[in-house]
Image (cartoon, grey):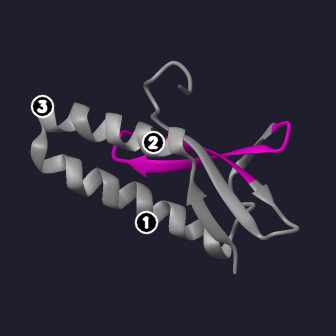
Amino acid sequence: MARWVLSEAAAQDLERLTDFLLQGMPEEATRTVDLVVDALHILEQHPQIGRMLGLGLRELVISRGKTGYLALYEYDETSDLVIVLAVRHQREQDYH
């Protein structure tokens, strides 16, 4: 079973997304973080489930109603480790 870790940048992304939700929809902030973390746990059993982006990067689509979130990650088969590099809302232009 693979392990997954958040990079510092991905942790900051989750904090940024939470702060944004706390401003307009505070009741959704905790649910959203739980949704993202639950989706990342899928990578423990299926680390190659995300679509390939090239250069060894993959993208996990995390559905939330009409939109959702995207997690950019890389998987090192040798160490069986998933490193989540970034998390963003699907409507954002690019990863930070």
Percent across and percent down for residue 78 are 88, 68
| The stretch drawn in magenta includes residue 64 | yes
- From the image, tell me which residue sits under label 3: 24
- From the image, tell me which residue sits under label 1: 38
On-image quarter of the N terminus:
bottom right
In the structure shown, which secondary structural element does the residue marked by tag 2 occupy?
strand
Left or right position of 76 against 60: right
Amino acid type at image mark 3: Gly
Amino acid type at image mark 1: Asp
Q: Earlier in the sequence, mark 2 or mark 3?
A: 3
Residue at x 24% of width, y 31% of height: 20
Left or right position of 24 against 95: left
Amino acid type at image mark 2: Tyr
- From the image, tell me which residue sits under label 2: 69
Magenta segment, prevailing SS (helix, strand or loop): strand
Report the front residue among 22 and 68: 22
Instruction: Give the CA separation, mark 2 to mark 3.
Output: 18 Å
Q: Earlier in the sequence, mark 3 or mark 1?
A: 3
Alpha-carbon neighbours of circle 3 within 10 Å: few (<14), some, or many (≥20)? few
Alpha-carbon neighbours of circle 1 within 10 Å: few (<14), some, or many (≥20)? few
Instruction: Give the CA separation, mark 1 to mark 2.
Output: 12 Å
